[in-house]
Image: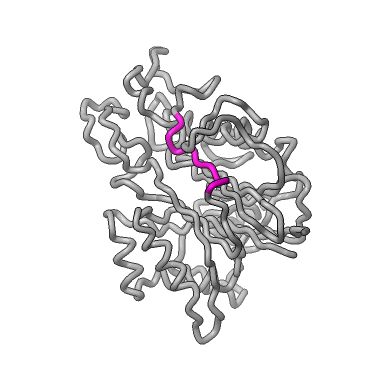
Amino acid sequence: MVVRFASYNTALSRPHSGALLATLKSGKDKQVLATIALLQEVRPDIILLNEVDFDASGETAKLLQSLLRQPSSTRTGLDYPFFFCKPVNTGMPSGRDFDKDGDATDKGADALGFGDFPGQYGMLLLSRFPIDHLASRTFQHFLWRDMPNAHLPKCTSGDAWFDNEDLAVLPFSSKSHWDVAIKVNGQVLRCLCSHPTPPVFDGAERRNFCRNQDEINFWSDYLSKASYMIDDQGRRGGFENGDFVLLGDLNASPYEGDSDRTAIQNLLAHPTMSAIGFPNSIGGVEHSPNANVKHSAYHTAVWRMQADYVRPSRLLETVGQAVFWPDSRDNQHSLLNNTSDHRLVYLDVIIKP
């Protein structure tokens, strides 16, 4: 069976709590409708959507399921009977002055993860195949201080940026890290999902740079079966065994940008990870004609960087992959109108019974 996995930063987040839900209910928002059309065109079987605001009722996820099921005059509906959506750290009040400006009430900068309200910039996994929620794991609450060799930021003086009271509440994950178990063709396959914070928008202490680095390092440790991590379900230890696909906007490139490149390079080269090349697009080259063509072919964002990933474990057989970025001569190029500043990335693999 050929199964298409995809990752897409939708940029559907809204500036106020409940605004995305209201937008979905209206059924008239151009960005939402364009996103639905794009997904119905590419037709992933399993997809991680980044920047979908979380709501505890699950209504946002159910509305997206409903909109995707509805056919248009040119496209058939797309049915995702199953979804995985859990709380994230973005916008969660910390009670601490994380940005050290003397005010501990800043909504965004002082939250457990940057966001103006709880759940902003959340994650949603949609699937055609059943999800084993009991076997799945989340790491929303694991503290940064409890990560061995954590790259905790320092002041220019060399002193620690975060004090002990900060570290007693500060998780390493700006949103959450998920290990989602999905039953596909008689097999259990794991989807490793995350959206690390951008490594910028901070100061000389580079606290976002450090956090992005360790959010990526976590997956390398996890795949190496490290014993230190404890999930939100109380289970200790890293990845066990089996096939997996890593999904998400990691806000890091192995050869460009402001992140710590060692972290992403080490993850992509991990022994459990497939050594296949990166997906590419003609549209990325057209968008950045003056850049290194090799690099621009791999770009997944209009701001000219490879940020989004769908990477399989080494034993999965890959039969196709791409960044969905048609160039201006392609009839599908119009599908990008009114959509995100990111591009959808997909991977086709064979899942044997």
Write down the quadrant of residue 203 in the picture.
Answer: top left
Question: Which range of residues does the magenta coloring cover?
Answer: 134-142
Whether residue 305 is visible: no
| Corner quadrant of residue 169 | top left
Q: Report if residue 46 lies within the magenta region.
A: no
Q: Residue at x 53, y 32 (%)?
A: 213
Q: Is residue 159 visible?
A: yes
Q: Is residue 138 magenta?
A: yes
Residue 258: where, in percent of width, then height? 52, 36
Residue with the most extreme bottom position: 73
Residue occupying image coordinates x 53% and y 54%: 301
Quarter of the image for the C terminus: give it. Answer: bottom right
Q: Position of residue 239 (x, y in %)?
A: 64, 36
Q: Is residue 193 above or below residue 323?
A: above
Q: Locate residue 162: give its quadrant.
A: top left
Please give the name of the residue rendered at 73% of the width and 39% of the height, measured from the top-left corner: 272
Total count of labels: 0
Q: Position of residue 236 (x, y in %)?
A: 56, 30
Quadrant in which the N terminus appears: bottom right
The percent position of residue 85, horizontal first and vertical second, equals 45, 53
Indicate whether 174 appears above or below 76.
above
- Residue in the foreground of this view, choosing between 219 and 189: 189
